[in-house]
Image (spheres, rainbow, N blue to C red):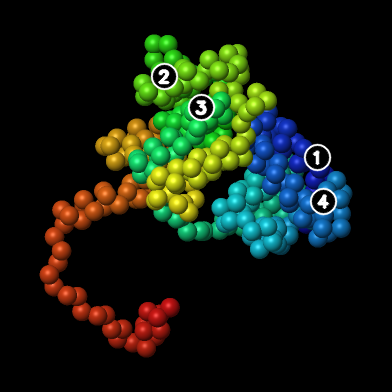
Amino acid sequence: MREPTIGFPTLLQDFFLHRLIAQRGASTRTIESYRDAFELFLAFAQERTGKRPTDLALGDLDAPLVLDFLDHLESDRGNSARTRNTRLAAIRSFMAYASVRDPASLAVAQRVLAIPSKRFDHPVIGYLTRDEMAAVIAAPDRSTWSGRRDACLLATMYNTGARVSEITGLCIGDVLLERQCAVHLHGKGRKERVIPLWKTKAAELRSWLVEIDPALTAPVFPNRAGRPLTRTGVRDRLDRAVVQAARTCGSLVGRRVTPHTIRHSTAMHLLQSGTDLAVIALWLGHASPTTTHLYLEADLATKEAALGRLESPEHHPTRYCAPDKLLAFLEEL
């Protein structure tokens, strides 16, 4: 096997600067995700090989090391299979680039590319009922500046079904309150969409905007320092609202509610109101309608209605008995 002719540090830098940024125009979030994956991977490789990242060769990053790294993510760092697959996707993308950029790396790259993603269970989507959602939105203390911000934040998240990254990135210039009341969201993969606002939510946003910096580039939901709320900040404000709402809405006691739970709630309530799945997919900014079908699968009321239209069979099926010992063994697996 020929030795790679281009050093690993050069390949990795070219991958980020030329492949991801210059050629593919990858989003900031994609760059950050890939960066985090390689920071973890290179730290793990340094510990295993005793070499600094700048001294590593591509041959050091072979399939056994990658597999050990993936096991480390799950067993030592407690990452989920989904996170494991995300890290693997970053490494595989780099290896695919390296195999083209330096054909001498093909053998190493192919063995890593052959590592499959790990399958995992997809839990049933969790969402809030309309009464629970109303209780959460009503929870913040509107007599305070932060309470008015939080109430407007939660109402906007529910109205739009925005991801937490979209809501923290929302600027004054993205809010349209003149002829049409809507917000302009900047989503994953550079996908943008405009979501209409209910009249009551538009009025609440209009009242809130007079309390903050009016510059078009200023955040709609700032912290006390005037900077955009972070993901952690949004989660903290939501946690506080849920604790407060649980005092009047007992079904919220002990519930784990995340910003994505609000997004799921928006989708489920649109579905239950009769909105077409294609419209919900556009509303949420889904790249594939398959993702939106998960809400249909989670809607128990729709399934119960379908069951009500189907008559229950009266006969009792007989128990299957395997006619052969080997078949019986297979049945017991």
> Label 2 sits on what residue type?
Ala
Question: Does 311 sit left or right of 234 as displayed?
Answer: left
Q: Residue furthest top?
A: 179
Give the residue at mark 3: 143
- The reply to whether dot 2 and dot 3 touch (C-beta < 8 Å) is no
Give the residue at mark 4: 57
> Label 4 sits on what residue type?
Ala
The residue at the point 35 percent across, 50 percent down is 298
Separation (CA) of disc 1 from disc 2: 54 Å
- The reply to whether dot 4 and dot 2 touch (C-beta < 8 Å) is no
> Label 1 sits on what residue type?
Thr
Q: Earlier in the sequence, mark 4 or mark 3?
A: 4
Q: Earlier in the sequence, mark 2 or mark 3?
A: 3
Q: Residue furthest front?
A: 143
Q: Identify the disc placed on residue 10.
A: 1
Q: Residue furthest bottom?
A: 325
SS of the residue under disc 4: loop
The residue at the point 52 percent across, 18 percent down is 209
Of the two numbered discs 1 and 2 in the rendering, the one whose residue sits closer to the viewer: 2
Q: Identify the disc placed on residue 109.
A: none
Give the residue at mark 2: 203
